[in-house]
Amino acid sequence: METSRRSFLKAGGLCTLGLASLPAADALAQAALPKVMANPTALVGKKWGMVIDMKKCWEKGKEGCKDCVNACHVTHNVPDIGNVKEEIKWIWQDEYEHAFPGQATHYNEEFIHGKKFILLCNHCTNPPCVRVCPTKATFKRKEDGIVMMDFHRCIGCRFCMAGCPYASRSFNFKEPRPFIKTELNQTFPTRERGVVEKCSFCEERLAKGQIPACVEACKPGALVFGDLEDPKSEVRKLLASHYTIQRKLELGTGPNIFYIV
Amino acid sequence: MKIYNGDKIIPGLIIFLGLITLPLWYNMGKAAPAPEPKLDTPVIQRLAEKQCVLPKGEMRTGHMQLLNDWRTEVVRNGKRVYVSKTGKEFNMSLQNECIRCHSNKSQFCDSCHNYAGLPASTTPYCWTCHIAPKENK
Amino acid sequence: MLERAFSGSDKYYRWMTALLVLMGLGFATYLYQYNQGLTITGMSRDVSWGFYIAQFTFLVGVAASAVMVVLPYYLHNVKVFGRITILGEFLAVAAVTMCLLFIVVDLGKPMRLLNVIIYPTPNSILFWDMIVLNGYLFLNILVGWNVLESERKGVHYPDWVKPLIYTSIPWAVSIHTVTAFLYAGLPGRHYWLTAIMAARFLASAFASGPALLILLAFILRRNTKFDPGRQAIDNLSQIVTYAMLISVFFVGLEFFTAFYSQIPGHMHALQYLFFGLEGHGKLIPFMWTFAILAVVALVLLINPKTRKDDKTLQIACVCVFVSMWLEKGLGLVVAGFIPNPLEQVREYAPTVPELMISLGIWATGFFVLSVLYKMAISVKEEAAS
């Protein structure tokens, strides 16, 4: 059969393409897992949120108390990098004018001057971090509204960190394990350098029927966790009976952390 | 047939063939014994029914895909309970379930992975995040 | 045609060797970063994007500027640009290559970069950036190569190249609009949350890109037999003038909105850049240099005598390029993060390894540019003889 070199190469290219499509089709074909289900003892909620009663924290909490921060960081093997530049924090404390910039003026500050606020990821209803993630490594779970991190997929582009208006996210600039100063929680993994991390509303604890570590650790009970869509939940009762403020509401992110002041 | 620049092409070809077949002859004569992952951990010995998530053959070839699928179900879909074909329920977790029975990582996981030449720090890099079990040697 | 890049004058070999040395040093430093992590850079939890992304942002503009010669020539038959469209297209190839390299070195997990393709996420602007950048690279390589090869053979380029050329025109605008959207859609960053972000990007791109093109044309004229022609240089310099005027005007618009409204969130970043904020002001000298160079450039460009004089034109182009680089490659990205969302001022400065890697990537870009230009010039010199 007479054929030119050009047509031979064209045919060869098409054949290679055809051969290459088989593994691609294989990868796309979904292998059905036998059966997976949620843990029956899991806490179930449609929209997890938190009400933080700062008054309780200031009035009943001990001076310099960091129970919530320590509980979270120990439970999740969060490293203590030791410098502001690369620190990793899932939950932390900061003053009013930093927690609510734009709200603090010279005179209204006198009431809460120097008082700390507990800051963490707001698990927004309309999260900009999820909107910008190019791989869906951070995503909003439909079942319960938690903004999750998939550490296996994160490429470390840090677009989510640029997108978050609350500075809730931290990046692993270097290997975190040498910096874990507390005893390792053997049931929870650590992370690798190169991925972004943040509060996950303790979803691994919720799956076992436990409330978040920070909520459990707060002795005055200032942190209250619950389902915002359940009118009978404690968070809804608190919201109905107290005035609360939220961070940067004007940005339309729909944060789900409320502060009683 | 005259090969132009033959004095450069032939040696080049020989070097190329040598390099490209490197994996085949580099380890000649250094045959290591086939790996025998050990299943004699205390937890396994105490089990009445010594049954893993999948049969041995399927686990050997498919544990990578299984772990990947488990990760997707746990992290992305929030489902943590796996019901195997035999009806047994497993918690879908490498660190908390698989390792519960197979706590002898160096004699189990590593025995095959080292044999296959997978460097521990890159492939598979489970253990830079998932905490490896403390083994009593 | 590529073999023409392997032979040249002694000066050419020395230039390429110097570039290769810089590329090697940059690569070695990158291996250090790959090994240690991004901790070796100056980036922090607060300023999470730094020098790498700033370079990427600036170079996307340089890449888009190819359209400034392609559009007039192919759409409006401005024949004077005929000889330099290839220079614009090849400059785009080199610039986009640098962009992609800067993105890769900035990633925390570069080995996972294919995740952006395996898990496409249309709501993420970064996904679209990946598509438009790679598409633009592909377009310019295809178009430039085929047009050049046809010139070498002494024939008109094949018909199928024409629709690709037409596509590259809006595509060039899109690469820079999409890159601007990376910044302009983030609710928490007030310095970037401006509707004219994409417009600012395009204006500064159309100033800095053609300015570089003019400088490259002069370098080629001095070292080869290639002459783009007086008319082409004149037209390009007019484009640079208008684009620079618009760019500076846009910066002025930002200043007005910020300082007339007196809204703290709008003012803070500009205050930090030009006057310092809470005692911090590392970027002040750079920003005022930008301002001074911009004024010098405009004075030299608006005055027809200095614009038409080769020496002053080249000085003006250097001023344009450097001032735009300072404003976009340094000021824009860093000031978006300062102050941070908690209104704290945490400064950023690139580290030596970070600069070394960046230098290596710039050298790579110039290497690619030199290879392509050498090829193009050789073909054109042969066609002319």
Image (cartoon, coloured by chain):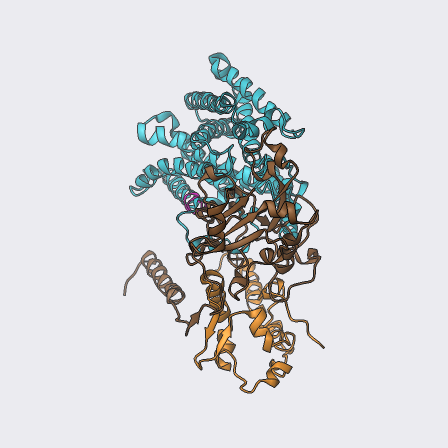
Chain colours: A brown, B orange, C cyan
x and y percentages locating residue C321 in the rendered image? 53, 27
Quarter of the image for the C terminus of chain A: give it.
Answer: top right
Task: Judge whether residue C375 can be spotted in this image.
Answer: no
Say whether residue B110 is left or right of residue C249.
Answer: right
Q: Position of residue C245 (x, y in %)?
A: 46, 20
- In this view, the residue in front, C57 or B24, is C57
Q: Is residue C132 magenta?
A: yes
Q: Position of residue C221 (x, y in %)?
A: 50, 27
Q: Which residues are magenta?
A: C126-133
Q: Is residue B120 above or below residue A133?
A: below
Residue sitting farthest toward the bottom? B48
- Quadrant location of residue C282? top right
Which residue is found at the position 39% from the left and 38% from the top? C174
Relative vertical location of residue C325 with respect to residue A72 in this rendering, above or below? above
Residue C297 shown in magenta? no
Give A252 or A164, whichever is nearer the viewer.
A252
